[in-house]
Amino acid sequence: HRRTFYFPRSFVRYVDELWEERTLLHFSDGSFATGHDASRGNIIKMSAKFWVSTEKLRTWLASWDEWEAEQPTWFTSPDINFEARVVNHVPEEALPPTVLRKILIKAQDGVNSPVASASRTLTSVGSRTLASTGSFADSEPSELNTATLVSMVKQ
């Protein structure tokens, strides 16, 4: 028998394949970005229920400090609104320490930024944390490990 080229797959599986294989991103202004990071930054625009596993997100988001230093187009693009989407939708367990620290520091300072405009705002997450921990008086956020930061954000 001849097999068909068609293979049915769920949207979640399709997104997982895009995560691993796609390397080109087209912006609404007609420009392009290449590489897995650009493509994955765009996938984050989709509903969180279709995202890849938390472990894949954690591994990928571990490059956050490099992206902040390099400021690639997909990282700063208002079309993607990457930082806000990550802060507001990625599970706390997958957030990189830099982002967790920002959440807590901005909450402590009472700063509300464009990043804080969606459902899980920097101030609401951080306020819950500060209410349960009091403050950072005992330790600086930069000195806290990831597990401690995650537990603080979850409180």
Image (cartoon, grey):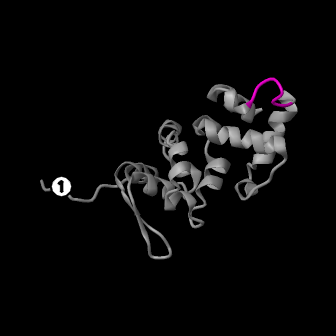
* Figure check: 8 above or below 109: below
Furthest toward the top, the residue is 138
* Figure check: 146 above or below 112: above
Q: Main secondary structure of the magenta part?
A: loop
| Residue at mark 1 | 3
* Figure check: 147 above or below 69: above
- In depth, the one of 45 and 63 nearer the eye is 63
User: Is residue 137 in the magenta section?
Assistant: yes
How many discs mark residues in the rendered view?
1
Q: Residue at x 50, y 42 (%)?
A: 63
Q: Residue at x 67, y 50 (%)?
A: 88
- In depth, the one of 73 and 94 nearer the eye is 73
Q: Quadrant of the C terminus?
A: top right
Residue 153: x percent and y percent?
Answer: 73, 35
Q: Residue at x 50, y 55 (%)?
A: 41
User: Is residue 147 in the magenta section?
Assistant: no
Q: Residue at x 60, y 66 (%)?
A: 78
Residue 96: x percent and y percent?
Answer: 59, 38
Secondary structure under badge 1? Answer: loop
- In depth, the one of 87 and 63 nearer the eye is 63
Q: Label 1: how many residues lie within 10 Å, few (<14), some (14-19) or many (20+)?
A: few
Furthest toward the front, the residue is 69
* Amino acid type at mark 1: Arg
Residue 102: x percent and y percent?
Answer: 70, 43
Question: From which residue to which does the magenta span run?
Answer: 135-140
Residue 79: x percent and y percent?
Answer: 57, 67
Furthest toward the left, the residue is 1
